Image (cartoon, helix red, strand yellow):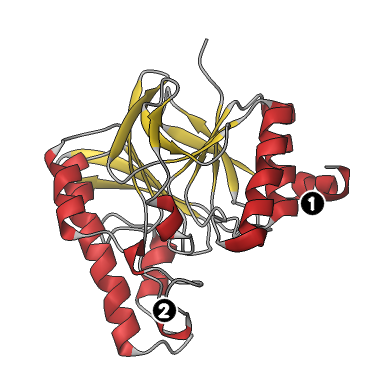
Amino acid sequence: MAERIGLAGDWHGNQTWARASIRRLATDHGVTTLLHAGDFGISPGPDGEAYLDAMERVCADFGVRVLVTPGNHEDWRHINRVPIEERDTVGRVGWLTNHIAVLPRGHRFTLNGRSFVSLGGAPSVDFQYRSQGHDWWAEEAITELEAAAVAAAGPADVMLTHDSPMGPWWTPRVAELCATNDWGWPQEALAYAAHGRRVLTMAVEGVKPSLLIHGHYHLVDETVIEHDGRSCRIVSLHADGQGGNLALLDTERLGVKWLGVARVADQWKKV
């Protein structure tokens, strides 16, 4: 029997939203594994510890395993120090708690007979307004060596990222956002972000996924592209509190079923 798999975009340590989402995915849809596309909420200090403790409790209560492809707004110093262990079929990963693991860059695993590769991280376009080691970590950016290693390891059915690659490997709404600068970010910041997308694209072109799932841009979109004689479905997951933050993964057809926002909001006070 195929495992029920959920998808989620950025949660930013929003404990209320995150707990309600786990509950909904498990009780309404039978999800036992959640693939999280980053900015999960891995933060330093007591607040970060309290969030992980709360998330571990709800995951244990509802029997959900969370596999995090980390984002940019995560404590990368902590992520890189988490011991890598092989506890189950997902292989050697960093277990933050008994039910929550962070996937190392380039990690490959299999679910429901489909091959997956994870490549987390992204440049923070607002890095100039953050403090190194407090709410920003330079390790957030994927290196060219890491991207080259992922590409060299060859194809996978599904690629999990936080950032989006460049065109043609992006959804229309991400392409539109990257073509504008409504927030007035400095050119240095825009160049940093664009370089990150270029580096990620190097890896994507080697993996040649049939499905690519990412977060980061706080919008929801979906498209299918044709590239080098192959098709790829690109899925952009929204952020906490928004419709399109949650979805179900269809591993047979390599598609997604979007979940709306209302039921999660209704459950906030019940968890």
Check disc 1 and report the residue beneath it: 265
Q: Is residue 87 above or below residue 197?
A: above
Camera-near label (2 vs 1) is 2
Mark 2: secondary structure = helix
Does the rendering let one see residue 71?
no
Q: Position of residue 208 (x, y in %)?
A: 21, 40
- Left or right of 44: which side holds 77? left
Task: Give the residue displayed 35% in from the left and 58% down from the top.
Answer: 164
Name the residue located 34 percent from the left edge and 69 percent from the top edge: 138
Corner quadrant of residue 193: bottom left
Q: Nearer the viewer, residue 253 or 5?
A: 5
Q: Is residue 266 above or below residue 180?
A: above
Residue at which label 2 appears:
127
Amino acid type, mark 2: Phe
* Quarter where residue 64 is shown: top right
Whole-percent x, y for residue 68 in the image:
48, 44
User: How far apart, in angstroms, are the residues tagged by discs 2 and 1?
Assistant: 31 Å
The structure residue drawn at horizontal position 20% and vertical position 51%, both measured from the top left corner, is 146
